[in-house]
Image (cartoon, helix red, strand yellow):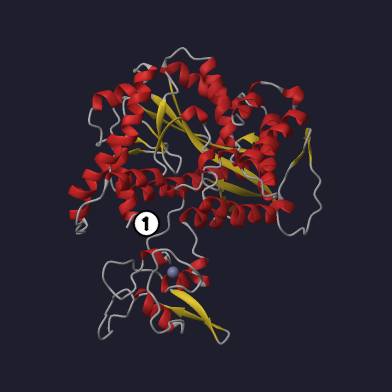
């Protein structure tokens, strides 16, 4: 049941609403760091062990289940609620730690990194503009495979927020890296920026959003959210993000690089960035049987006897029994000649490539090639994108940039919003191009270590060794920022 994205999204929305808090005042003191350390530690333990799971249990039994017409015999147990929270990666943590190494080794994440991200990066390597390790002013000479394809420039994009009184307090950290803060954090700036090793910070592509004291809702790192419906919320993030890429980032990149270069945009793998259009080919949105509540998807296709056959996913209006109904998995497979007698509809947990109808259909080429909205937008503009593995901040070298920008802001802070606003452009421009090239090198070091099969700890050691031998003479602030990620 918890693998149902709608239910999971509802539960996450509930948890982030803080409605589970038995003593909202105490929670608020805690988030503002107003408790003495010992009391804070005890409260944290109490919250994670007791209040959150209890609130969640109550919410599921009294609100959620009746609404989705699910009858629960004896309700859910407290340990179940605790387990679920843990499994979902809910965790109270100090954001200063910055990295989410503890979830690096989650099997699905490792699978994506090793099986998808690293091979894809390898395939782009011969086309990517890079700089010589130890001499970042020199471009690395890479023999070209052909002169038809343009050179690629890796583009790191991310967002951050800064407040006039930026106290790095604890906050809830969720699996898709959204940093949540209760309202009332004061006025602040929300920045969206882009970096590459060829020209550095893309000044032209910068975007700033001011937010004030009176915003309702919760900061998710990307938007203030009012609505509880997370599906709409993620679609919102996604369309904002798509617009930003199309209207701001890509034009800025093209102006800075000219026609000879193509951007390879690294997109962080959060739910808001991997949304699909409403009619996308997604088995997860299908029922086994026709009709009912399921997505109406655009046409698919398959190959029969060497020719491509277009297959509608919805029955025609003159169908005798299922007029205008979505076909469902079984009928779609039957039409493709892939349905076998007594084939299971959907497994809870798939065991092979042919264990059930859902699995067979999702491996079909038309379903496999379904692109996310972000990908569609980037490719339509003539550029490329790559999804980063979750929780791997060290692979998105803009994280180091944020670190340096925040340090500049803290060092020049007088706790007023006006000064913050004045300092922001200076902070962004303060990072040297050479430093950005070194951060990109660190990213390549991490990738090499992962390719060699190292786990997080060993990869970390190797990258640390790399930067201390290669960049000994550059122990300046921005490099030190990168180092804090190694600790
Ligand atoms: Zn299966």
Residue that appears at 45% across and 44% down: 176
Residue that appears at 59% across and 51% down: 113
- The quadrant of the picture occupied by the N terminus is bottom left
Residue that appears at 50% across and 57% down: 376
Residue that appears at 51% across and 23% down: 424
Q: Is residue 476 shown above or below 160?
A: above
Q: Position of residue 456 (x, y in %)?
A: 61, 41
Where on the picture, by quarter, is residue 416? top left
Q: Which residue is mark 1?
A: 3
Q: Is residue 264 shown above or below 362?
A: above
**Lateral position of residue 141 relative to residue 191, left or right:** right
- The quadrant of the picture occupied by the C terminus is top right
- Ligand 1, seen in the image, is in the quarter at bottom left
Q: Is residue 263 visible?
A: yes
Classify mark 1: helix, strand or loop. Answer: loop
Identify which residue, 297 or 72, lies in the foreground.
72
Q: Position of residue 386 (x, y in %)?
A: 58, 51
Q: Is residue 88 shown above or below 313?
A: above
Identify which residue, 396 or 201, lies in the foreground.
396
């Amino acid at each position: 049941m918890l693998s149902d994205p709608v239910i999971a999204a509802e539960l996450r929305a509930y948890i982030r609403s803080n409605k589970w808090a038995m003593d909202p005042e105490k929670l608020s003191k805690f988030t503002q760091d107003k408790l003495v350390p010992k009391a804070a530690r005890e409260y944290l333990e109490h919250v994670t062990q007791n209040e959150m799971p209890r609130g969640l249990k109550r919410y599921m039994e009294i609100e959620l289940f009746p609404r989705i017409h699910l009858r629960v015999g004896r309700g859910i147990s407290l340990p179940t609620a605790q387990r679920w929270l843990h499994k979902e990666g809910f965790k109270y943590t100090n954001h200063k730690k910055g990295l989410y190494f503890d979830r690096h080794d989650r099997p699905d994440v490792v699978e994506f990194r090793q099986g998808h991200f690293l091979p894809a990066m390898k395939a782009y390597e011969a086309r990517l503009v890079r700089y010589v390790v130890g001499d970042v002013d020199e471009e690395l000479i890479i023999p070209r495979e052909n002169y038809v394809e343009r050179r690629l420039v890796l583009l790191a994009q991310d967002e951050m927020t800064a407040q006039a009184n930026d106290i790095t307090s604890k906050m809830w950290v969720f699996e898709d890296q959204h940093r949540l803060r209760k309202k009332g954090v004061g006025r602040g700036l929300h920045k969206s920026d882009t970096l590459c090793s060829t020209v550095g910070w893309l000044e032209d592509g910068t975007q700033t959003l001011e937010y004030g004291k009176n915003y309702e809702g919760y900061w998710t790192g990307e938007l203030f959210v009012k609505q509880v419906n997370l599906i709409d919320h993620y679609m919102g993030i996604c369309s904002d993000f798509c617009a930003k890429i199309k209207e701001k980032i890509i034009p800025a990149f093209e102006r800075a690089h000219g026609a000879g270069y193509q951007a390879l945009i690294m997109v962080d793998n959060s739910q808001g960035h991997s949304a699909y259009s409403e009619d996308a080919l997604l088995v997860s949105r299908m029922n086994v049987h026709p009709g009912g509540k399921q997505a109406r998807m655009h046409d698919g296709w398959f190959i029969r006897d060497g020719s491509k056959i277009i297959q509608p996913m919805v029955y025609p209006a003159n169908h005798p029994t299922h007029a205008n109904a979505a076909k469902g998995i079984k009928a779609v497979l039957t039409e493709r000649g892939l349905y076998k007698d007594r084939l299971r509809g959907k497994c809870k947990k798939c065991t092979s490539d042919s264990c059930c109808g859902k699995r067979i259909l999702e491996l079909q080429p038309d379903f496999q090639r379904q692109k996310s909205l972000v990908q569609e937008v980037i490719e339509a503009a003539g550029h490329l994108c790559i999804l980063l593995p979750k929780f791997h901040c060290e692979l998105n070298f803009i994280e180091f940039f944020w670190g340096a920008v925040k340090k500049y802001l803290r060092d020049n802070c007088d706790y007023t919003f006006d000064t913050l606003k004045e300092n922001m452009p200076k902070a962004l421009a303060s990072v040297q191009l050479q430093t950005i090239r070194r951060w990109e090198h660190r990213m390549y070091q991490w990738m090499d270590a992962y390719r060699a099969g190292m786990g997080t700890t060993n990869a970390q050691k190797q990258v640390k060794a790399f930067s201390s031998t290669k960049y000994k003479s550059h122990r300046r602030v921005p490099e030190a920022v990168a180092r804090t990620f190694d600790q």
